[in-house]
Image: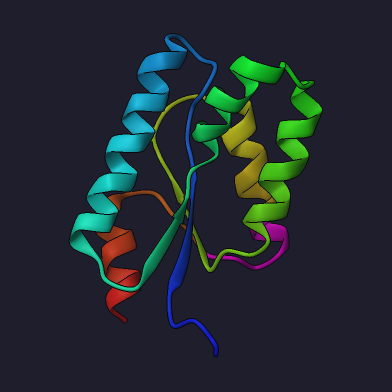
Amino acid sequence: MKSTSTYIYIAAPYTQNDTVQNVRCAIDIAHEILEKCENVAVFLPHLYHFWNLMTSCPRSTWTALCLDWLEKCDIVLRLPGESKGADLEVRHAFMLKIPVVYSLENLLAYIKE
């Protein structure tokens, strides 16, 4: 049975400034998406933060995992803020012709289409 969900990838700052605050902000946006939308599946790479606290894998491991998951998504939401990682994710999305939006409002409009 094929899923009818829209798969959303959240690309946002992680290591710039306060990592814990960045994770919190990304979780808040992901939760807001789930509250406002039906039939969505949100991938939040920031949750690897907790896994990394327990295992300390090299950054390249997380980057590779994130890009693999991004390839499965229908759209990328790029949150504001400086981030080499999020910029890499956006470039990867563009390369794969996955749409990128830069606000929650634009994401909601995309989902309603």
On screen, residue 74 versus residue 38, left or right, reads: right
The count of marks equals 0
The answer to whether residue 2 is above or below residue 56 is: below
Q: State the residue lying farthest toward the front.
A: 54
Q: State the residue lying farthest toward the top.
A: 17
The answer to which quarter of the image holds residue 88 is top right
The answer to whether residue 49 is above or below residue 47 is: above
Given residues 63 and 106, the one toward you in this image is 63
Q: Residue at x 44, y 83 (%)?
A: 4
Look at the image and tell me whether residue 83 can be seen: no
Is 26 magenta? The answer is no
On screen, residue 84 versus residue 41, left or right, reads: right
Query: Which quadrant would the C terminus be assigned to in this image?
Result: bottom left
Q: State the residue lying farthest toward the left.
A: 36
Look at the image and tell me whether residue 47 can be seen: yes
The answer to which quarter of the image holds residue 51 is top right
The answer to whether residue 51 is above or below residue 29 is: above
On screen, residue 98 versus residue 28, left or right, reads: right
Magenta span: 93-99
Q: Residue at x 60, y 15 (%)?
A: 53
Query: Which quadrant would the N terminus be assigned to in this image?
Result: bottom right
Q: Residue at x 33, y 72 (%)?
A: 111
State the image coordinates of residue 81 (x, y, percent, origin top left): 43, 27
Given residues 24 and 2, the one toward you in this image is 2
Q: Residue at x 38, y 35 (%)?
A: 26
State the image coordinates of residue 45 (x, y, percent, origin top left): 55, 39
State the image coordinates of residue 52 (x, y, percent, origin top left): 64, 21
State the image coordinates of residue 27 (x, y, percent, origin top left): 35, 36
Given residues 84 and 68, the one toward you in this image is 68
